[in-house]
Image (cartoon, rainbow, N blue to C red):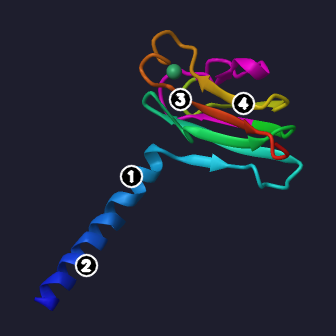
Amino acid sequence: MKRSRMRTGIVALLFALLLAPAVLAEEHVIDATEWTDEIIEIEVTSSGLRFTPSEIRVALGSTVRITYVNGGGRHDWVLDEFEAATAVIGVRQSETVEFIADEAGEFEFYCSVPGHRAAGMYGKFIVVDMDA
Ligand SMILES: [Cu+2]
């Protein structure tokens, strides 16, 4: 009895270990609110019509440098509220944009190629007022 329960536990643990990387890749969150570097440098990649990370958190007032590395297709990385946008680039190309996150709130970055945002090519950009 005891042994079979332990075996079930081990099988469950193995399953969790096997599944964990896939789940992390799907819902990758970067929380840079505690980063103390002068410039918050984050690499964003895409695979199909998905960005990774899909959620980025920074502290209000941060200087943010996003480097978008295109994993396939033709895409860009756009964040309207901070007037940040790369050009539409091809596979394995990259482009960097820099801006100051000077407004707190929850925003959405996306790909502006027609149909891509609607198909799920977007993510959350959250600016946290650490003094609030
Ligand atoms: Cu796109």
Badge 1 residue CB within 8 Å of ligand 1 = no
- Residue at (45% x, 27% y) in the render: 49
Residue 37: % across, % down: 85, 53
Q: Is residue 51 above or below residue 119?
A: below
Q: Nearer the viewer, mark 1 or mark 3?
A: 1
Q: Nearer the viewer, mark 4 or mark 1?
A: 4
Point out the residue furthest to the front here.
132
Residue 51: % across, % down: 53, 34
Q: Is residue 131 magenta?
A: no
Quarter of the picture containing the C terminus is: top right
What residue would you read off at disc 4?
A: 105
What residue would you read off at disc 2?
A: 10
Estimate how packed mark 4 is, as few (under 14), some (14 to 19) or many (20 or more) residues with alpha carbons within 10 Å: few
Q: Which residues are magenta?
A: 66-89
Question: Mark 2 to mark 3: distance in Å?
Answer: 41 Å
Q: Nearer the viewer, mark 2 or mark 3?
A: 2
Q: Three-letter amino acid code at disc 4?
A: Gly
Q: Three-letter amino acid code at disc 1?
A: Ala
Q: Which mark is residue 22?
A: 1
Residue 79 as seen in the image, left or right of residue 114: right
Estimate how packed mark 1 is, as few (under 14), some (14 to 19) or many (20 or more) residues with alpha carbons within 10 Å: few
Quarter of the picture containing the N terminus is: bottom left
Q: Three-letter amino acid code at disc 3?
A: Val
Q: Earlier in the sequence, mark 2 or mark 4?
A: 2
Estimate how packed mark 3 is, as few (under 14), some (14 to 19) or many (20 or more) residues with alpha carbons within 10 Å: few
Secondary structure under badge 2?
A: helix
Question: Mark 4 to mark 3: distance in Å?
Answer: 32 Å
Badge 3 residue CB within 8 Å of ligand 1 = no
Q: Are marks 4 and 1 in contact (CB under 8 Å)?
A: no
Secondary structure under badge 4?
A: strand
- Residue at (46% x, 48% y) in the render: 25
Question: Mark 1 to mark 3: distance in Å?
Answer: 22 Å
